[in-house]
Image: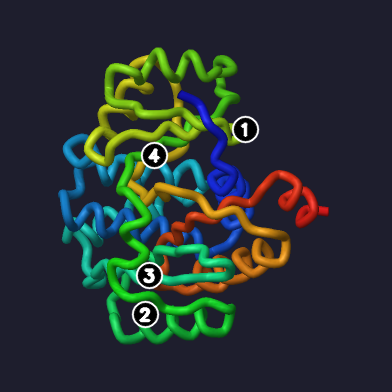
Amino acid sequence: MSGHSKWATTKHKKAVVDARRGKMFAKLIKNIEVAAKMGGGDPGGNPTLYDAIQKAKKSSVPNDNIDRAVKRGSGAEAGAADYSTIMYEVYGPQGVAFLVECLTDNRNRAAMEVRTAVTRNGGTMADPGSVSRLFNRKGVVIVPKSQEAREVDEDAVLEAALDSGVEEVNDLDESFEVVSEATDVVAVRSALQDAAIDYDSAEVQFVATMDIPVDAGAADKVFRLVDALEDLDDVQNVFTNVDIPDDVMAALEA
């Protein structure tokens, strides 16, 4: 059941650094606002909102900011923007594929900024469908190994979530990535909670069907492109099928 997703490990470590940036807070707040607008402002009856709030709290977003975002999204308070989701498909160095998910109130601005970031950082815009076919929508729950009451191992995660639709558990060094069908993500998260296992985030993501290994030069370019895209206000997520081998990662970190 267990593999090791190198990009997921890298991305999770990167998220810890990014969480220190104000932009990460803004993106988490935007997720909450959209979830409240789509499914109502009650987290008890809106699992997407519940998980958006959980992720924001785990990233130290202040409760006041969270509450205001819920109120804006649900219509209880004025000031909500009209966001729409757009997906851009991109090729990077050595044929690495990227899906760039935007949440924007200005489609023209988002398109221009994404295109500029891609072309300036060695990427090319791809035809619709050419990249998305390389990914599947999956439910992804991140479970920290170190929890308040105990250390959680892979067997405990599997035992708790196996009957709820979990497909695989990947070791991300300091946490586990629990992958399921997109429609099972709430069931998996709930099963873990029932077993008193805490989680950092639970959401639907695009997971690559096949990874592309790269050398150090290409890996560096991939990071530059990802950073440039994630620095854009309209970009919520960047998904890629890059596989950075351990020796290349070690060389980059050195």
Along the polypeptide, which appears first: circle 2 or circle 3? 3
Along the polypeptide, which appears first: circle 3 or circle 4? 3
Residue at left offset 57%, top offset 84%: 120
Quarter location, residue 46: top left
Q: Which residue is mark 4?
A: 140
197 relative to 186 in the view: left or right: right
Q: Which residue is mark 3?
A: 89
Mark 1 belongs to which amino acid? Glu
Along the polypeptide, which appears first: circle 4 or circle 1? 4
Q: Which residue is mark 2?
A: 110
51 is higher (above) or lower (below) than 11: above
Q: Which residue is mark 1?
A: 174
Residue at left offset 54%, top offset 54%: 212
Residue at left offset 44%, top offset 83%: 115
How far apart are the two marked residues, 3 and 4, measured between alpha carbons?
Answer: 21 Å
Q: Give coordinates of residue 185: x percent, y percent.
A: 29, 35
Quadrant showing the N terminus = top left
Q: Give coordinates of residue 132: x percent, y percent.
A: 33, 61
